[in-house]
Every structure is written in structure tokens, then in C-alpha cells.
């Protein structure tokens, strides 16, 4: 009789010990996992940066725009010098290409004589629309999202050709 | 044989784990052991919580003065669960102090430090000091105003220590100012030096407790029981209660994060964490040469007395109810501590920013000098407002400029624009890429702001501001004056709209000889946009 009481007491103590430790571990593990794995809340940053003026671009004559863009990296917001190759294809339509060659990321430039973009690293060439003409580049030039407000050219994030720029 | 048994046996053969755990759990403890002996276990548990939450914080924390504050803010505002983790770490440190002190009090009252347990006690005193050192070094790491000014006082006290002062100052990296070096030292101590030392001391402490056994009470007369499960149950329940208290505090009590450390905010009244408030209060009564008593002599005496308690009181073990002297000492200490802490809380006013009024009478952007107004253009163009407010209002990364600029000189501001961390240690502000003349204009603009005029000035239209910039660019002020600044070679331009028409002014700028053949004024070939902005600005000038 006395032995069963002792055994019951032991079972009770053990279940409280295991139960409380399990609960404590969960109360630590769950918040810790959320803290580490949950994506950070996005900052409300204006994705559009003014990069230049429509009136300063010439038709069918790409020009390199230089502007500063805020980059958010965790707690760090840094202002980076950024460039874009802007092509005015009509009075109301402008394309802005990201400045890196889609092959290995070299900086390409506009070759006015041949009317094409030329990447000096591996001689990829691109049409004024950004399509690959020759060379190893795997795809057309990446573009910035772009909108025009009155005369201002507002540049947004980069997207690959064919991706929905919405 | 069950799978569990086979796994345990396999492990036992190779590591001896099972017998080690059994050895640990089935230790004999005195029959009188009970709830009063759970505090040591709770203290170890809280240390583990501190390590755990500390590591988690470090995953998203940048340990430099420039970024510490921003990264902590990121943890608090952008990461889910971030404020809970910080709450655990912050309130965990306070709770740890409470538990460590209670543990010590219990050991003291029960006389558990007596022969042969002197070494256990002394290691324990070491652990108390380390716990306080954790609090002291961790205090700086948020790099807010509270952290900064608290640490200024701490390092000041250290530097006043006799003989050791200069060496301590160098060691803490606080020569001249509390800055990047101090921060690195405090961080290194807090996360690299103190944790392993604590672990080592805890290991020694627990080893010694095991070696001598838990202190029996005189009435035990040798009777024992097993540590497991009875005492483990009590430890577990106590640990769980402390954890729930901590968890609830972390969830419900917001840990303050003040504004970014501002070494120039001389109106700030620094205060230490609550457990150091009694020392803070003592220091108020001891001024001048007596201060050394409070900062060095008393703490040294207290630590020495604590450390040598086992040698001061060498009487044989007695029941704790008979230890009237020990109880008296504890009571006196508790009363003294409480009185001093309460006095400190009651008598220290909350710090507030002292408002200052600038001597300027400017009420309107039209009254600004062209230089200052052009500064507004640079303010807008350089997107200063992504981190600063002009008028105090919604929260911003940097200070509100209408307030902050009042106590700065233009020369200071220009140094600050070029290299902000050089003037405000730890500032995360990027350099402003402008020419010196433009920086001067920006400083002049900020200097003219007050809390009263800022919203009016901020409303200046873009084209007016652009006009002021053109006025600056073409150095009109070399001959003309506006709002009392500039030279008197040509006529002052205030009230121009009352004297002349727009077309007249445009011609005067483009070809002055048309109005006056012997005019000294050069011809300016402005673009239509520039001309429009400049003339609009000039025509808007007050009388």
C-alpha cells in the first residue's frame, strides 16, 4: 500500500518535471524560431527614384543616367550611386536598362558608330531594344521599371526581360 | 529489450552517459533540503536564458556605435518576436540580479558558507561581481542616450580610482571620450570575456557544492534523501515560476529605447540601472574629496567584507533561526539599500530636453538670406528628410533639425556634413556630397530654423528655392543685397517687385546695357528655366 503511494508520488513528480521543462523549451523555441525565420516586416520605402528628365533624352540615342538610389540592407539604408542606360524610343516611351551585361555582369556601353550596346568583356552586343545580337550573353539586357511623371523619369526595381514589370 | 533500452545501453557503453546522469541525479542531499535551496538552480537557469537570448540578439545586432542603435531598432520594429527576445534579455538581467542576491542571502542566513565551504562562497561572490559586470557592460550596447550617459558616469568613476584610474581608463577605451573604442571594449567584455569566465566559475561552484554536499541543517543528524526527483521537482517548479515571471515581463513591459546617443546633450541626467541606484544616491552625498569614499572605498570594503565573510564569522553551524546577528545584518542591508534606492528614484528628476529659443526673428522664408534659402534646396535635393525631420514630429532616424541646429555652429555643421562620425561618435549619417559653398548654405539654412518658424520656412515653394540657388550660383550677392546680406555695389533687391516689372528684370539680367549704357552689371545668359526661377524669386522678395 505504502509502496503504491510512493510510486504514484514519483510518477506525479516526474510528469510535472518533464511537463514544465517541455513547456519552458517550447516557450523559448517558438519565439526564437519566429524571430530567426520569419521575414522582416518590409519598410515603407518609396521604390521610385528620380533618375533624370525626359526632355534631356534624345530619340534613339541612349544616354547613361547617373543617380543615387537608397538600398535597404537590414537596418542599413545606404545611398548608392547607380546608373541606367536610358533609350527614348518615342516621345512618351523610355526604356531604362540595368548597367550590367546579363552574361557576367560587366559594364557595357553604347557604341554609337555601330548603333549597338557593346560589352567589352566578351564582346556581347545588344540592339537598342536590349536584345542580344552576338556573343555569349544568355538573355536580353535587364530593365528597370520606369514611369514618367510630367518630365521626371522615375526608376524602380530591376526586372529580367519577359518578367511582368507590373 | 526495448529500443530505448538498447539505445541507452549503446550510449552507456561508449560514453558512460547514463551512469553520469544517474550519479548526478541520485546524489544524497540532507533530509532538511527543500524550497529554500532552489535559488542556485534558478540562477543557473537564468544565466542560460541570458546566453540564449543574447546569442539571438547578436544574430541581428551590429556591434559598432554607428549601427548598434539602428540594428536594435530593426530588431524591435521589423523582426517578429524581436522585442520579446530583447525583453527576455533585458528583464532577465534584472531578474538574475534579484535571484543571485536572494541566493546569497539564503546562504548567508543559513550559514552555509562555513567550513569547509569557504571556497564555494568566495567563488559565489566572484559570480555576483560578474553578474554586475554583465549589467554594467551590457548597459552601453543599445547606444541610446541612456546607455551613453550612463557609461560616461561609469567610466568617469573608474578613472577616478586611486593609482589604477589611468590604467582603467585606458583599458575601458574611454580616454577623452566614450566612443568607438569604449564600445568595442564593452562589447568584447560582455560577449567574449564574461560568458566563458561565468561558465567556468559556475562549473567550479557546482563542483564544490557537490564535493561538500548541500549544507545540512543541525537537526538533520545525518539523515539524507535523494536529489531526484523530490528536489529536482522543487527546482523545476521554481525555475518555471521565474521563467513565467520573466516571460510575462518581456511581453508586457516595454523596454525603453531612447533616442540615439547624443554626446552633446548636456541636459541629459544619466542614471544607472535600478540595482546600482543606491550607489548613485550615495555619491550624491559625498562630494569633492569625499567622492572617492563612495566610488572606491565603500565598494572595495563591501566586496572585501563579502568575500571574507567565512573568515569573519567562524562559529560552528547553528539553526538559521538562531543566527540573529546574520539576520540583523541582512535586514540592515536590505533597509539601507531600499532607502537609498527610493531616495534616488524620488529625488532624480526625469531628464527632458531643455528648449532653447534662437535669437533670430525670421518668421517667413521670404526673410531668409538667399544663401539660407538655397540651403533648403540642398536639404531637399540630398533627401536629408529620409532620416531627419525639420520640425519635431513623427519619429525619424536622425535628430529633428529645428531643435538640434540651435546649439550648433555653422563650422561644426560643415564638419558634421563631411564626416558625421567625426563629430558625433557613432553617427550613421552618410557624408553629404556638396561643394563647400553649398554646405555653408545648408548650415546657414539650418541655423535659421527655430521651432516656431520651421513649418513656415518648410513651405517655401520649389521654384523660389531654386531661384535662391541660382542667385547663389551666379554670386549675385557680390554686388547686391537681399534681406540685409550681400554687398552694396548694386541696388538692394528687396522690394524689387514694387519698383520694376518682370520683363524689365529679365532684360536687366540678360543685357543690362539696354537699360543703362554704362552699367557695371555683367550679362548673364541664363536658360529659360533658370531665368524664370531667379526672377520669380526676386519678385517675391519682401520690401
Image: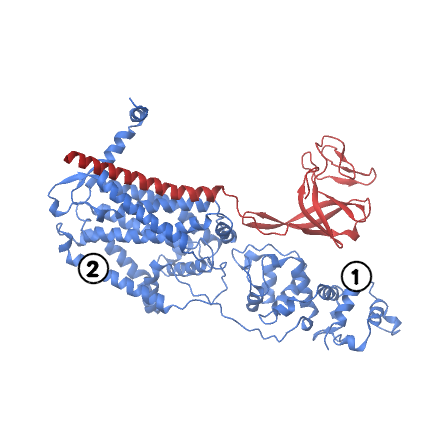
Chain in red in the render: A
Mark 1 belongs to which subunit?
Answer: B
Q: In the rendering, at what x and y percent does residue B232 appear? A: 25, 41
Q: Are marks 2 and 1 on the same chain?
A: yes
Q: Is residue A78 above or below residue B370?
A: above
Could you tell whether B488 is left or right of A9 in the image?
right
The residue lying at 28 percent from left, 43 percent from top is B236
Label 2 vs 1, first from the N-terminus: 2
Could you tell whether B118 is left or right of B84 in the image?
left
Q: Residue furthest front?
A: A1
**Quick one: B225 or B355, which is closer to the camera?**
B225
Residue B451 visible in the snapshot: yes
Disc on res. B529:
1
Q: In the rendering, at what x and y percent does residue A160 appear? A: 68, 38
Q: Secondary structure at mark 1?
A: helix
Closer to viewer: mark 2 or mark 1:
1
Q: Is residue A14 above or below residue B148?
A: above
Image quadrant occupied by the C terminus of chain B: bottom right
The residue lying at 22 percent from left, 58 percent from top is B330
Chain in blue in the render: B
Q: In the rendering, at what x and y percent does residue B453 appear? A: 61, 71
Q: Which residue is mark 2?
A: B329
Amino acid at each position: 500500500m505504502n509502496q503504491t503511494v510512493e510510486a504514484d508520488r514519483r510518477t506525479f513528480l516526474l510528469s510535472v518535471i518533464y511537463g514544465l521543462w517541455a513547456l519552458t523549451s517550447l516557450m523559448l523555441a517558438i519565439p526564437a524560431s519566429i524571430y530567426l525565420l520569419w521575414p522582416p516586416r518590409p519598410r515603407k520605402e518609396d521604390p521610385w527614384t528620380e533618375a533624370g528628365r525626359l526632355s534631356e533624352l534624345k530619340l534613339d540615342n541612349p544616354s547613361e543616367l547617373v543617380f543615387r538610389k537608397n538600398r535597404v540592407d537590414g537596418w542599413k539604408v545606404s545611398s548608392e550611386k547607380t546608373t541606367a542606360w536610358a533609350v527614348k524610343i518615342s516621345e512618351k516611351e523610355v526604356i531604362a536598362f540595368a548597367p550590367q551585361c546579363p552574361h557576367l555582369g560587366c559594364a557595357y556601353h553604347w557604341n554609337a558608330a555601330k548603333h549597338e550596346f557593346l560589352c567589352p568583356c566578351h564582346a556581347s552586343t545588344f540592339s537598342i531594344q536590349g536584345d542580344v545580337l552576338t556573343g555569349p550573353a544568355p538573355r536580353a539586357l535587364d530593365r528597370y521599371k520606369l514611369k514618367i511623371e510630367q518630365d521626371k523619369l522615375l526608376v524602380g526595381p530591376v526586372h529580367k526581360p519577359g518578367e511582368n514589370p507590373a | 529489450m526495448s529500443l530505448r533500452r538498447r539505445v541507452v545501453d549503446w550510449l552507456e557503453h561508449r560514453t558512460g552517459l547514463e551512469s553520469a546522469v544517474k550519479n548526478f541525479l541520485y546524489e544524497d542531499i540532507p533530509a532538511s533540503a527543500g524550497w529554500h535551496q532552489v535559488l542556485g538552480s534558478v540562477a543557473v537557469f537564468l544565466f542560460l536564458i541570458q546566453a540564449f537570448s543574447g546569442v539571438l540578439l547578436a544574430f541581428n545586432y551590429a556591434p559598432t556605435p554607428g549601427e548598434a542603435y539602428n540594428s536594435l531598432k530593426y530588431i524591435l520594429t521589423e523582426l517578429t518576436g524581436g522585442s520579446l527576445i530583447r525583453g527576455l534579455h533585458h528583464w532577465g538581467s534584472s531578474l538574475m540580479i534579484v535571484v543571485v542576491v536572494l541566493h546569497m542571502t539564503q546562504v548567508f542566513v543559513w550559514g552555509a558558507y562555513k567550513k569547509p565551504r569557504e571556497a564555494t562562497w568566495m567563488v559565489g561572490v566572484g559570480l555576483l561581481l560578474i553578474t554586475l559586470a554583465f549589467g554594467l557592460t551590457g548597459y552601453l550596447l543599445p547606444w541610446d542616450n541612456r546607455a551613453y550617459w550612463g557609461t560616461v558616469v561609469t567610466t568617469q568613476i573608474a578613472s577616478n580610482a586611486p593609482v589604477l584610474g589611468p590604467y582603467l581608463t585606458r583599458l575601458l577605451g574611454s580616454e577623452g571620450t566614450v566612443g568607438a573604442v569604449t564600445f568595442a571594449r564593452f562589447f568584447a567584455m560582455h560577449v567574449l570575456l564574461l560568458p566563458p569566465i561565468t561558465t567556468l566559475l559556475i562549473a567550479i561552484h557546482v563542483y564544490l557544492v557537490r564535493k561538500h554536499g548541500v549544507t545540512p541543517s543541525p537537526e538533520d543528524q545525518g539523515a539524507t534523501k535523494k536529489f531526484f526527483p523530490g528536489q529536482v521537482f522543487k527546482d523545476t517548479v521554481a525555475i518555471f515560476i521565474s521563467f513565467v515571471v520573466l516571460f510575462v515581463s518581456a511581453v508586457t513591459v516595454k523596454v525603453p529605447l531612447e533616442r540615439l546617443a547624443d554626446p552633446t546633450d548636456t541636459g541629459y541626467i544619466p542614471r544607472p540601472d535600478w540595482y546600482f541606484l543606491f550607489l548613485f544616491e550615495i555619491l550624491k552625498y559625498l562630494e569633492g574629496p569625499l567622492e572617492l569614499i563612495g566610488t572606491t572605498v565603500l565598494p572595495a570594503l563591501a566586496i572585501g567584507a563579502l568575500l571574507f565573510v567565512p573568515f569573519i564569522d567562524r562559529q560552528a553551524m547553528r539553526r538559521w533561526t538562531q543566527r540573529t546577528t546574520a539576520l540583523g545584518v541582512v535586514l540592515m542591508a536590505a533597509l539601507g539599500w531600499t532607502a537609498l534606492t527610493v531616495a534616488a528614484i524620488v529625488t532624480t528628476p526625469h531628464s527632458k530636453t531643455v528648449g532653447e529659443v534662437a535669437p533670430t526673428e525670421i518668421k517667413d522664408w521670404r526673410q531668409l538670406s538667399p544663401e539660407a534659402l538655397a540651403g533648403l534646396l540642398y536639404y531637399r535635393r540630398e533627401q536629408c528628410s529620409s532620416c531627419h525631420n525639420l520640425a519635431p514630429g513623427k519619429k525619424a532616424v536622425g535628430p529633428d533639425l529645428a531643435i538640434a541646429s540651435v546649439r550648433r555652429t555653422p563650422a561644426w555643421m560643415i564638419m558634421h556634413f563631411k564626416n558625421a562620425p567625426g563629430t558625433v561618435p557613432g553617427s550613421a549619417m552618410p557624408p553629404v556630397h556638396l561643394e563647400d559653398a553649398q554646405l555653408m548654405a545648408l548650415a546657414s539654412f539650418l541655423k535659421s530654423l527655430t521651432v516656431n518658424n520651421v513649418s513656415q520656412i518648410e513651405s517655401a515653394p520649389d521654384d523660389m528655392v531654386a531661384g535662391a540657388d541660382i542667385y547663389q550660383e551666379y554670386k549675385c550677392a557680390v554686388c547686391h543685397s537681399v534681406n540685409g546680406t550681400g554687398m552694396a555695389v548694386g541696388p538692394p533687391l528687396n522690394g524689387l517687385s514694387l519698383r520694376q516689372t518682370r520683363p524689365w528684370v529679365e532684360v536687366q539680367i540678360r543685357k543690362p546695357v539696354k537699360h543703362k549704357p554704362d552699367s557695371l552689371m555683367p550679362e548673364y545668359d541664363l536658360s529659360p528655366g533658370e531665368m524664370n526661377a531667379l526672377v520669380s524669386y526676386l519678385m517675391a522678395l519682401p520690401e
